[in-house]
Structures are given as structure tokens and as C-alpha cells.
Image (tube, helix red, strand yellow):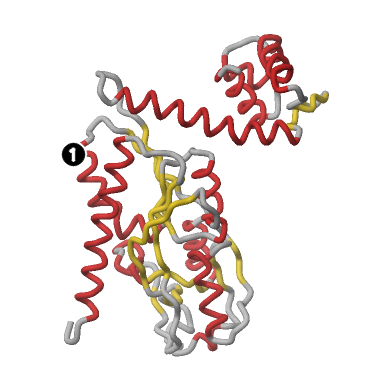
Amino acid sequence: MRLEQLECLISIAEVGSFREAARRFNLSQPAISKMISSLEIEVGTPLLIRTARGATLTAAGSAIVTRARVISSETRKISEDARQFSDGDGMVVRVGLTAACSHALLAPVLTKFLKQMPRARLQLVDSSFNSIYAQLRNRDLDFAICPLSSSANGRDIDSTALFSSAMTPVCMPQHPLRGASSIKDLMGEIWTWAEDGDGGVVSDAFRDNNLKKPFSVVSDSFSSRLQMILACNAIALFPTILLESNFLRERIAPIWVREHLPEARYYLVRSAHSPLTTQAELLAKLFAEQAEHVRAAQVIRKRPGY
């Protein structure tokens, strides 16, 4: 079993076609077919269902692709770890982030990291929680800074608590209910949130106050939720730490309700079975250190007279 065979199988699974996979690898279609046939003989079972429209994975093929992605990712990391000691280009560090984490941590962390690792290349991924966890399990991300998702259950994900933020409803500054004092007054409005809203804290906010979650437009894109607020007069439940952003402060306004709302908690999450590369380990360390500064600043704000 060769890495090239596994990567071809991954490619066919992604594009659904032998022809397109052959283009990716700059090989002929018969060459790709021969590699897959040899792999199927070796494992003793069909891995793909071939049709006139393309190819789809069998159950066995799907199971092998899941493991093949891990093998391919780990092989890439071996090369990247070695490359940092050579004169070649810097390796790629792939990190998943949510909007609150980007605002609270990213700028100072990047400044320090790029000063120490000037040749490093970063890929920052903003996607839904469940997507982030799937990418962690596939080793497509080195680690992520985000709330814990319901999909994080299991022994394959490690998590380290970083910081927390109170939650508050937000709206556009001209919203007629901006001055509301109770979340009950907002129940008839259109809301927007992510599918797994800050690790379940959105659902908790309504359940803890004996309220049924109102009608909402679900979007895993932060920019789409912001557009819903600005263009459709929607209301969202945001971490208050986002209100410190100059960009957002000019565009959205908090609604200070009297009800107690749960805090959103943010973690550094990573695969439990895959060691970080040297550069990813440094970046994770810098995120953890910056989170300490965030927590310290929050303590100061809570002091009487602050």
C-alpha cells in the first residue's frame, strides 16, 4: 500500500471523478484506475462504485479514506517539521478560529509568532464548530480556538480552557427595541445565530430563563450573521468581548437585558493523537499566553470602581 494510492483515493472521493483526480495528479486516467484497482486487490474489497457519472465511495472506501486523510496529513507534517531546519519555505500552520477568538487574541499573537517564525505560513479557518472538529479529526487543522462543540465528545479531542465572555443580545443602533430591558421583549423579533451557537450557550440562554428559542436564521458564517443584523434588523446573541472591536462598535449596539445569560467559554482544541509541529506548538503556546492577559483584564474590569 503506497501513499500515492491513498492520496488518489482521497482525491477521487473529493471530486467524484477519475478524470478530475487524474488532472490533479497530472496523470492519465488509466494510471489512476490502475492504482485504485491495485489498492482494491490489496485490501480485498471494492472501494469505489464506478458509474457513467463518476465514482462514489463504498462503505469500505469511506472508512479507508478517513484513515488515509490522517496518514496524508501526518506525512505532510513530517516534511514540514524537517523543512523548518532547511533553507526551504516555511511550513503551513492551519488554525480554526471564531470571530470572538480572533478579536480577543489574534493580533498580538500573530505579531509575536511572525517575529519568531518569519518564514511560517498561516492558514486561518473561520467555519462552523462541527466543521472545525471534523477538520481536526482529519488533521486538516493543527488546532482550533473556539467553544466546545457537542461533536467534541470522545477521546480523540483534547481541550484546554482559555477564556470566557459574557453574552448579550445585539442589534443595529437604530433598532426600535435597542432600549429593551428584558429578553422577553425581544422574542417576537428575527434572530440569527450559528447552528451550535457558541458551544450551546445560545440554547442555554433561553432555556435558563424558561423561554422557547425564537424564530431564527441559522448561519455558520459570522459575516452573514452581521449582515442579517444590519440589513434585516435581526437580533443576535454575541460575546460582549466583540463589542470592544472598533469595527463592530460602530455598527452594532448591545441590548442590556436584566436576565442572567450564561457565559461563552473558549478553548484550545486539538487532536489527542497527533503531536503538533514545532511551529504549531509555538503558536498554541502564544495563544494560551495571550488568553491569560485577557482573563487578567477581565478581573480588573470586575473590580469595584473600575
Left or right of 142 on screen, residue 249: left
Residue 189, position as x, y percentages in the image: 58, 79
Look at the picture and state if 253 lies above or below 133: below
Residue nearest the viewer, comparing 135 with 247: 135
- The residue tagged 1 is 115
Residue nearest the viewer, comparing 52 with 246: 52
Q: Residue at x 33, y 61 (%)?
A: 162
Residue 188, position as x, y percentages in the image: 60, 82
Left or right of 38 on screen, residue 305: left
Q: Residue at x 53, y 54 (%)?
A: 128
Q: Residue at x 44, y 39 (%)?
A: 274
Left or right of 121 on screen, residue 62: right
Look at the picture and state if 28 lies above or below 69: above
Extreme residue toward the right, this view? 52
Residue 48, position as x, y percentages in the image: 75, 27
Left or right of 125 on screen, residue 164: left
Look at the picture and state if 169 lies above or below 260: above
Residue nearest the viewer, comparing 282 with 251: 282
Residue nearest the viewer, comparing 288 with 25: 288
